[in-house]
Image (spheres, rainbow, N blue to C red):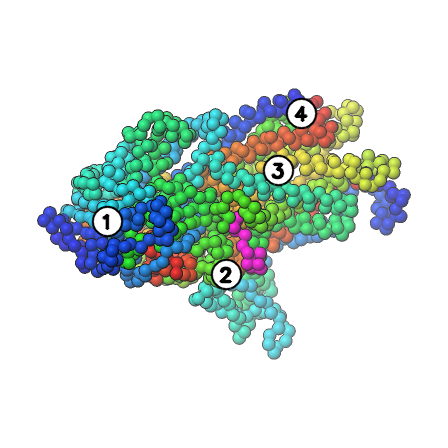
């Protein structure tokens, strides 16, 4: 087991390098660069730069250097100084841009995660043990509807309905008077006031999906021979359920655990945009569209690291949960 | 000598040298009366309470010391045309809050915080008046321009402004290849890329002279409005702040340390300098925080999702009662994730000032919620641009395309096929009018008749016209993404053209892709912005190398003396002849004004492009109690004059 | 496996039925088994029926819509749905008809108002002859399901340019419901093959494939999408471009499925019956074909049933981000993109109706997938 983990960790380094190269190349693939986007934005406001000024800006942004030089410098900065580069859009270090949004992003991601688990696991267990009852049908239906709705539409309609009914508009994670304020209880309270809607909307599709998965796996398990045997031997229904089947049914939860964080962060993009959240998702989208390459590259790289580590973690979890897989992996 | 239509009461200076002189408002008898009265009553200038407190606490020198010796007096007709606004004396305080979906740009803040060397009410270039440079003179042959800075003028950190700052900006930045690889053409004779660079000389601590080797009357516009906006920064920089980043002046060890700190290589001091040097279009960005400026507000540190500007205590303008401007303490902008978030932000009352981001189809919703949100939707001001026109790329290599669109009659037919009034009704709530220069006259029957006449009379099975090569003629219409509602306008035009049998494949393409195709000369038909035709200072916007680069090769041919590009046809040469007049003559001279008329006739004859409307009302969001908001005219003009906004 | 009724519980009627059917289960084929179980899943049956209807209508969209999807009605911009009436004042019940609409704009608030002109009723007629059009794009036809003589009928109102939202929704269905198949198919085939190969071979090969998958999962798709949109031939239509991009992205999009397939294989491989087959001397190919595959097919069918609605949803999300299909193409994503702003939600809610169809289609696919999953369960 230790050897297995050690080997995976060794592979991780070249793997991450490969991811960073591909990411950097992919971000540059679309035509144009950050400067074309910036100049286009200036034009929209009525200002026109002459060709000479464009040339000057190219030098200022360092975009006149070949791409591999830009990449090597960027990587060297990350490896030797922990410097993720410069964001053209925000005119700031990428580290700062990300750091400012990390707490809110993690807060939302983790609350969504708990929201999903707290809701999905009990419902799924009850659904599975009471298959084809009204409870099962009701939550199957609710879950499916949750899965079927385009997130942006849900977010948009909900935020309008809330405003129309209560006169209170959720237009970001913080009310305006707290955006500028340092952290305090009042600011935290304000955050809590604004955060529940995004958490529910982000969690909605996830909950529905997880209910289906757990319910399905649990149904499978409940019909297996060992359960039948145990029941025949007179093990109480409660013990029967909690001893093994639920443990196995949690399998999909753990096998995707590793990707949850990256997928929650990228899953926030759309809700983040509609509800104007100060999280990393919308920043990533905007950076990608504008080809703010170091910012986009850094975020994708971080998500890549999370994915790779996540895969490792979930492989370890799986091996621990289901000894047969461990045997298979070592074979 | 006085070839120019200058305002009454103007004092001409330097007559002996046969110079035409224009002076700033402060020497003007009519408007300076009240200020003179204020100054006479003990020289007591008014200032904002927040600043008065700082003065009392000893953190700031008194207002008399902060203002220049001859502050600029802002009154009716100074910043905005007199027919659009009667300026009131305002009161201090309050916050204006705009919104942007661009973390790097909010033109609401940018324009308000920008100053030019000289200025004119609402950018009309008529008359030109002093601004940062209190007065200026132009030689009779439009070649030598002498500007005098306001004496006692100070940067926002209190450092005096002098021609040393200009010398630094010109000699150590503009003329240094490391920092300016290419000199922008406005600093070259005739505004031509191949013109001789200007000669810059410092006369004394406040006076400097810029001369060219040929007539260049348009230079006044470059100093006054800039190349469509612009500011003073290119030739006036806060030397005291920037020296430490300049290789010529900085201590080598310090510079190396700064470079290291910024994560830049030892050979990249130019990048460090350019990052630290804040240009006009960067003045509202986060790295502009506390950079010395001459504008009414200074960018200060702020959280990531907010741009915050606070009043500049050293601002050089006062109102007619001698109160230092601006009236409003803070000017902020909320950064949102996407333009679609803006309406809710406005309705929620988080935003109270914005122009050009409010799409027309949001107006009914915003109007309905005015009271709840505590703002007002004003529909009295018009956009400064067309705001959009259809362009044809005449130099697309496709022979078939060229043969068709080079035909003036074809363009006349397209002009008749487009229902401009319908576009205005559907897209702009009817708030605008068709552009008279292209004589809009919706007549699809006539359009079809013309098309039949010019040999596009054969049609395919689907009823679309065949081109000269016998294949279906395709009016390839590619629109870039990102501009609100353009795809809708595209759909309307497409429907109109297909109704007369012109097959119009419409596609919305990514902005970067559009730019790539534009620069490669591969576009066919497209939409682009176009500055308003009734704003005659902006004729450059109609040259074939600007919007959508509809005839880039022609421009190149003329610029390279025929070495590259393609020789333009006679009608394009005609345009350049007019443009030559614009460049040589002063913007409001008789020659320039008559060139505008000729230009209008030229547009009518050739219809080189299709402006969809003019005088389109651009809805703006304002606080219900906003004072000194113009009642008519262009929204950009009154936004540039935000220093006179006040909250009642 | 039959579940014997627990001794402690009395046998319910459902259990009795199940027990009786169990007798014939012994002799039924796998397919029959699945169908029997599937039949019990009422939601899934509903799903099949609704989907069949939706696909049917979308195929003959031109017939089912009264107007061309691009036809503009000047003066009817942003019109609310036309009320369909059956009673006229003083004339009692009659066939469905609509009144003409008068449009006016309030110059203060700029809100568009429509008032019904009760003097001019126009009857809705069925199987009307209209301008000739092409059914499915190539069959000449002239009859539409319904239409009116005079005032137009807009069941779902009109959009900003005055086009019938109902006709556009019906036309959009064809693209939205069909365009995902190509991509799903490609990533399905690749995912099965590569995941299967990885799971069966194990060792170094498995290791390498797994790492490749991790890399692929980390590649951001948005810039890829932008790059592809630029690389695709210029004269391709919007729909063709979109379809091509989904196919190309499927080439990198198989990673997720491959991981799942491999995981499933790894656990199946350890099942007793596979071990038994191996011990009995079955070749690896025959193990896969005869033993693993049947166990797997049901699982994969479910995966596909759930992947297709995801492409429908994905299409709307992409449009929302400005990357998906764009006008003049008409798809549900395009229609929703036009309606995604607050002004539409607050004041022109009828323009969100296409969203209901997105939810409906995805829901029905989920029902079917769920029914299949339950039915194909090998343990029941």
Calculate the distance from the C-alpha at mark 4 to the C-alpha at mark 1.
85 Å
Q: Categorize mark 4 by other alpha carbons within 10 Å: few (<14), some (14-19), many (20+).
A: some
- Res C202 label: 4
Mark 1, residue position:
B69
Q: Are marks 3 and 1 in contact (CB under 8 Å)?
A: no
Q: Nearer the viewer, residue B141 or B413?
A: B141
Q: Secondary structure at mark 1?
A: loop
Which SS does the magenta portion mostly show?
loop
Mark 3, residue position:
A260
Task: Please name which of the two marks, 4 or 1, marks the residue nearer to the observer.
Answer: 1
Chain letter of the residue carrying label 4: C
Image quadrant in which the N terminus of chain A is located: top right
Q: Nearer the viewer, residue C84 or A212?
A: A212
What segment carries the magenta color?
Answer: A162-175
Q: Residue furthest top?
A: A3
Task: Please name which of the two marks, 3 or 4, marks the residue nearer to the observer.
Answer: 3
- Which of pointers 2 and 1 lies earlier in the amino acid sequence? 1
Q: Secondary structure at mark 3?
A: helix
Mark 2, residue position:
B372
Residue visible at 39% across and 58% down in the picture: B647
Calculate the distance from the C-alpha at mark 3 to the C-alpha at mark 4.
26 Å
Q: Secondary structure at mark 4?
A: loop
The quarter holding residue C259 reads: top right
Chain letter of the residue carrying label 2: B
Calculate the distance from the C-alpha at mark 2 to the C-alpha at mark 3.
40 Å
B553 relative to B645, above or below = above
Q: Categorize mark 1 by other alpha carbons within 10 Å: few (<14), some (14-19), many (20+).
A: few
The stretch drawn in magenta includes residue B233:
no
């Amino acid at each position: 087991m230790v050897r297995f983990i050690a080997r995976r960790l060794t592979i991780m380094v070249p793997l991450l390098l490969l991811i960073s190269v591909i990411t950097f190349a992919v971000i540059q693939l679309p035509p144009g660069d950050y400067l074309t986007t910036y100049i286009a934005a200036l034009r929209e406001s009525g200002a026109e730069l002459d060709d000479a000024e464009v040339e000057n800006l190219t030098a200022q942004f360092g975009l006149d250097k070949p791409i591999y030089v830009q990449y090597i410098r960027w990587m060297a900065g990350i490896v030797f100084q922990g410097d993720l580069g410069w964001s053209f859009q925000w005119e700031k270090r990428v580290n700062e841009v990300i750091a400012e949004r990390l707490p809110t992003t993690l807060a939302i991601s983790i609350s969504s995660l708990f929201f999903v688990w707290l809701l999905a696991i009990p419902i799924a267990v009850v659904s599975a043990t009471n298959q084809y009852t009204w409870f099962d049908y009701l939550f199957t239906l609710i879950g499916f509807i949750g899965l079927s709705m385009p997130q942006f539409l849900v977010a948009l309609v909900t935020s309008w309905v809330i405003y129309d009914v209560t006169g209170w508009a959720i237009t970001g994670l913080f009310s305006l008077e707290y955006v500028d304020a340092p952290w305090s209880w009042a600011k935290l309270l304000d955050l809590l006031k604004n955060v529940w809607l995004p958490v529910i909307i982000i969690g909605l599709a996830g909950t529905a999906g997880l209910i289906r998965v757990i319910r399905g796996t649990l149904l499978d398990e409940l019909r297996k021979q060992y359960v039948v045997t145990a029941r025949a031997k007179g093990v109480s229904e409660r013990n029967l359920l909690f001893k093994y089947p639920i443990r196995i049914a949690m399998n999909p939860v753990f096998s995707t655990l590793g990707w949850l964080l990256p997928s929650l962060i990228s899953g926030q993009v759309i809700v983040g945009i509609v509800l104007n959240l100060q999280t990393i998702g919308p920043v990533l989208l905007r950076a990608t569209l504008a080809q703010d390459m170091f910012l986009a590259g850094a975020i994708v790289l971080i998500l890549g690291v999370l994915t790779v580590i996540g895969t490792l973690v979930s492989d370890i979890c799986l091996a621990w949960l289901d000894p047969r897989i461990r045997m298979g992996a070592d074979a | 000598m006085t070839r120019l239509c200058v305002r009454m009461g103007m004092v001409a200076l330097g007559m002996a040298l046969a110079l035409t002189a224009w002076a700033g408002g402060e020497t003007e008898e009519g408007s300076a009366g009240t200020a003179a009265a204020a100054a006479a009553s003990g020289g007591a200038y008014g200032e904002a309470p927040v600043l008065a407190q700082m003065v009392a606490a000893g953190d700031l020198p008194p207002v008399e010391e902060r203002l220049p010796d001859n502050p600029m007096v802002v009154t009716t007709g100074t910043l905005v045309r007199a027919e659009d606004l009667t300026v009131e004396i305002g009161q201090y305080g309050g916050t204006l809050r705009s919104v942007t979906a661009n973390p790097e740009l909010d033109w609401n803040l940018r324009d308000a915080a920008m100053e030019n060397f000289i200025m004119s009410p609402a950018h009309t270039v008529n008359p030109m008046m002093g601004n940062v440079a209190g007065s200026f003179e132009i030689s009779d042959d439009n070649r030598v321009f002498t500007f005098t800075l306001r004496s006692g003028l100070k940067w926002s950190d209190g450092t005096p402004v002098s021609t040393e700052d200009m010398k630094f900006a010109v000699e150590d930045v503009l003329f240094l290849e490391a920092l300016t690889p290419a000199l922008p053409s406005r600093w070259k004779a005739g505004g031509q890329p191949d013109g001789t660079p200007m000669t810059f000389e410092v006369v004394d601590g406040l006076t400097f002279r810029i001369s060219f080797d040929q007539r260049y009357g348009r230079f006044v516009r470059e100093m006054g409005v800039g190349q469509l906006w612009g500011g003073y920064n290119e030739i006036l920089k806060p030397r005291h702040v920037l020296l430490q980043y300049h290789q010529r002046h900085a201590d080598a060890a310090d510079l190396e340390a700064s470079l290291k700190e910024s994560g830049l290589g030892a050979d990249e001091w130019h990048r460090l300098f350019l990052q630290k040097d804040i240009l006009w279009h960067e003045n509202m960005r986060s790295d502009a925080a506390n950079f010395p400026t001459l504008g009414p507000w200074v960018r200060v540190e702020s959280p990531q999702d907010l741009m915050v500007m606070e009043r500049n205590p050293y601002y050089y303008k006062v109102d007619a009662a001698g109160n230092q401007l601006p009236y409003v303490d803070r000017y902020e902008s909320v950064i949102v994730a996407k333009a679609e978030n803006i309406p809710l932000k406005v309705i929620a009352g988080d935003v109270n000032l914005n122009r050009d981001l409010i799409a027309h189809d949001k107006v009914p919703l915003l109007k309905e919620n005015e009271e709840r949100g505590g703002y007002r939707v004003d529909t009295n001001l018009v956009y400064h641009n067309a705001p959009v026109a259809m362009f044809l790329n005449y130099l697309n290599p496709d022979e078939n395309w060229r043969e068709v669109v080079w035909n003036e009659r074809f363009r006349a037919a397209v002009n008749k096929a487009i229902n401009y009034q319908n576009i205005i009704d559907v897209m702009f709530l009817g708030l605008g009018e068709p552009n008279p220069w292209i004589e809009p006259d919706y007549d699809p029957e006539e359009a079809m008749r013309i098309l039949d006449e010019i040999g596009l009379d054969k049609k395919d099975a689907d009823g679309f016209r065949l081109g000269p090569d016998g294949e279906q003629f395709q009016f390839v219409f590619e629109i870039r993404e990102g501009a609100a509602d353009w795809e809708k306008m595209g759909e309307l035009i497409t429907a109109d053209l297909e109704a007369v049998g012109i097959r119009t494949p419409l596609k919305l393409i990514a902005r970067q892709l559009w730019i790539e195709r534009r620069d490669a000369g591969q576009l066919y038909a497209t939409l682009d912005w176009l500055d308003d035709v009734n704003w005659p200072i902006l004729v450059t916007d109609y040259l074939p190398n600007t919007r959508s680069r509809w005839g880039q090769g022609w421009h190149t041919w003329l610029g390279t003396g025929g070495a590259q590009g393609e020789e333009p046809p006679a009608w394009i040469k005609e345009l350049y002849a007019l443009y030559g007049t614009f460049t040589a003559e002063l913007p409001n001279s008789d020659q320039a004004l008559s060139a505008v008329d000729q230009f209008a006739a030229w547009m009518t004859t050739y219809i080189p492009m299709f402006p969809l409307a003019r005088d389109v009302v651009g809805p703006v969001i304002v606080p219900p109690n906003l004072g000194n908001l113009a009642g008519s005219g262009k929204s950009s003009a009154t936004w540039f004059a935000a220093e006179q906004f006040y909250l009642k | 496996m039959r579940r014997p009724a627990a001794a402690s519980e009395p046998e319910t009627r459902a259990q009795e039925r199940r027990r009786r059917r169990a007798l014939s289960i012994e002799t039924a084929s796998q397919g029959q088994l699945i169908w029997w179980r599937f039949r019990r899943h009422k939601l899934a049956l509903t799903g099949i029926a609704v989907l069949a209807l939706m696909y049917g209508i979308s195929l003959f969209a031109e017939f089912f819509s009264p107007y061309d999807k691009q036809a503009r009605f000047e003066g009817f911009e942003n019109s609310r749905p036309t009320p369909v009436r059956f009673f006229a004042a003083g004339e009692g019940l009659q066939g469905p008809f609509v009144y003409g609409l008068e449009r006016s704009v309030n110059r203060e608030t700029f809100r568009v108002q429509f008032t019904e002109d009760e003097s001019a009723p126009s009857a809705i007629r069925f199987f009307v002859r209209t301008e000739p059009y092409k059914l499915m794009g190539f069959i000449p036809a002239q009859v539409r399901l319904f239409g009116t003589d005079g005032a137009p009928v807009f069941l779902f109102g009109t959009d900003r340019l005055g086009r019938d939202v109902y006709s556009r929704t019906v036309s959009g269905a064809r693209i939205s419901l069909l365009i995902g198949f190509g991509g799903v198919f490609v990533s399905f085939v690749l995912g099965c093959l590569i995941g299967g190969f990885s799971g069966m071979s194990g060792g170094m090969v498995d290791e390498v494939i797994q790492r490749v998958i991790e890399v692929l999962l980390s590649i951001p798709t948005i810039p890829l999408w932008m790059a592809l949109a630029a690389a695709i031939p210029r004269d391709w239509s919007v729909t063709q471009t979109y379809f091509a991009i989904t196919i190309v992205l499927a080439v990198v999009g198989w990673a997720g499925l491959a991981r799942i397939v491999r995981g499933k294989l790894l656990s199946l491989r350890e099942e007793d019956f596979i071990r038994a087959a191996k011990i009995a001397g079955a070749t690896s190919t025959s193990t896969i074909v005869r033993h693993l595959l049947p166990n797997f097919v049901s699982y994969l069918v479910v995966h596909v049933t759930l992947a297709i609605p995801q492409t429908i949803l994905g299409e709307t999300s992409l449009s929302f981000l400005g990357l998906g299909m764009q006008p003049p193409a008409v798809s549900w994503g395009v229609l929703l993109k036009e309606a995604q702003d607050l002004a539409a939600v607050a004041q022109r809610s009828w323009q969100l109706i296409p969203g209901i169809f997105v939810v409906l289609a995805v829901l029905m696919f989920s029902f079917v997938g769920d029914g299949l999953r339950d039915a194909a369960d090998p343990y029941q």
